[in-house]
Image (cartoon, helix red, strand yellow):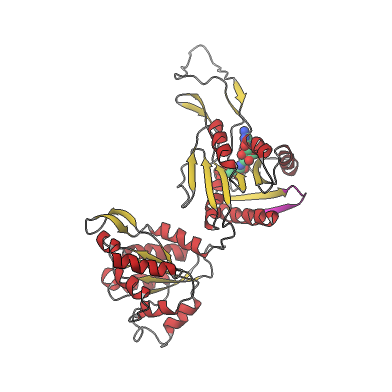
Amino acid sequence: MMKLENKNILLGVTGGIAAYKAVELLRLLKKAGANVNVIMTDSAQKFVGKTTFEVLSENPVLSDLFFDTESSVKHIELATRAHAAIIAPATANIIAKLAHGIADDALSTTMLAVTCPVMVCPSMNTDMYQNIRVQRNLDILEKDGWHILDPDSGVLACKTIGPGRLPDPWFIFDRVEAMLVKKDLKGKNILVSAGPTVEPLDPVRFISNHSSGKMGYAIARAAEKRGGQVTLVSGPVSLMPPIGVECIDVQTCEEMATQMLANFDQADIIIKVAAVADYKPLDPKAGKIKKKENDKDLSILMTQNPDILKLLGKKKTKGQFLVGFAAETDDLEKNARLKMEKKNLDMIAANIVGSSDSGFKADTNKVKLFFRDGSSFDIPLMGKDQVANILIDQVIEKME
Ligand code: PMT
């Protein structure tokens, strides 16, 4: 299922230079399965033409209450069926009108009739944005329960440097998704580990594994969207840090252990997705290991790393829910249950690895969850974001 499938989204575009970014936002919303209706102010149309939004949304654009529609109550119909409304970019003018209930064009009139969650994305010159009247109006909207997305700072179109730039469309999209998610992890601290660990052999070489971090990052992202306070301890990966998540970068198993233990006590749910190196070189060299012409073979003595999850399992107190992952190629259930027992876990996600669409590096995953009470739950092959949400559903259910 796509993320916003069957959702009706109202996208209000007002007259700012950032109106072009609303086009990309529309594309992202459409790609996620949403039905988008665009409402433009007159000044927005001075920046981007109506046709662009009409073609991409596959819906007529509303800009004039009297000429654009076959029905005199089209705006009420759009407002009533909307699951979310976004105003991006939002000028000082529309913000003032919305704050004071003025209805003198298609957008401001429609917005008086919406009852769904609303996100307002201010974008304007820094002095305008910081003007006490604009800030006062934004406060009014926020107190009324609307979401205000702070603008980015940077060099603006007017050459001013400061806050006022509309955030990137993918960022707005991410926050809209978050706005629509039920906050069933509100008040909970979630600690997640992700990615591989790397164990140095010398200053230029290391031992590691194929974990991309995708599964762990998907869990951290989903937990944040569901209202959790998330800390992510991550080995080296090439992924964007999830929005709203505290990220702690580590390299080795020792470093991961230190950070997981430091953040463990305040965590309610701990999910250890990271693929940790069980062994590390006993004696990593200070200088680069040189190739010796006469020695065909090279032996490296390895020593065991601490088992972080086992340490956490020993420390676990009542009320904490500890989840491990197990990457298995065979004897899935037997091996997973054994690990759950040995490490004192509440749940283990057994990950079928060895095929290109599941486990390491893949965008999809196939997982079977085993619980302490003997029960199990199958998650068939699906995107890692979806797996993350189902896994969290199961954790919440078992914690209740
Ligand atoms: O990152 P991706 O590319 O998205 O891939 C995801 C994944 C395949 C890495 C992930 O879904 C997964 O299966 N992670 C666990 C992999 C693993 O190392 O399993 P394991 O059987 O070696 O370890 C079992 C559990 O003990 C894991 O939760 C692991 O974090 C933990 N462990 C292991 C060794 C160790 N020294 N300390 C640990 O804490």
Membership of 373 in magenta stretch: yes
Quadrant location, the C terminus: bottom right
Depicted 355 relative to depicted 186: above or below? above
Q: Quadrant of ligand 1?
A: top right
- Estimate the x, y position of residue 327 in percent, counting from the top left: 64, 41
Membership of 47 in magenta stretch: no
- Estimate the x, y position of residue 101 in percent, counting from the top left: 37, 78
Is residue 282 toward the left or the right of residue 347 in the image? left
- Residue 94, located in which quarter of the rendered image? bottom left
State the extent of the magenta-drawn residues as a range: 371-381
Q: Main secondary structure of the magenta part?
A: strand
- Estimate the x, y position of residue 190 in percent, counting from the top left: 57, 49
Figure disc tally? 0
Depicted 180 relative to depicted 276: above or below? below
Question: Residue shown at 46%/78% (left/top)?
Answer: 79
- Residue 156, located in which quarter of the rendered image? bottom left
Quadrant location, the N terminus: bottom right
Whether residue 56 can be seen here: no
Whether residue 95 can be seen here: yes
Question: Residue shown at 46%/63% (left/top)?
Answer: 176
- The extreme right residue here reads 374
Say which of 344 and 199 sits in front.
344
Say which of 335 and 313 sits in front.
313
- Estimate the x, y position of residue 382 in percent, counting from the top left: 60, 55
Question: Residue shown at 52%/65% (left/top)?
Answer: 180
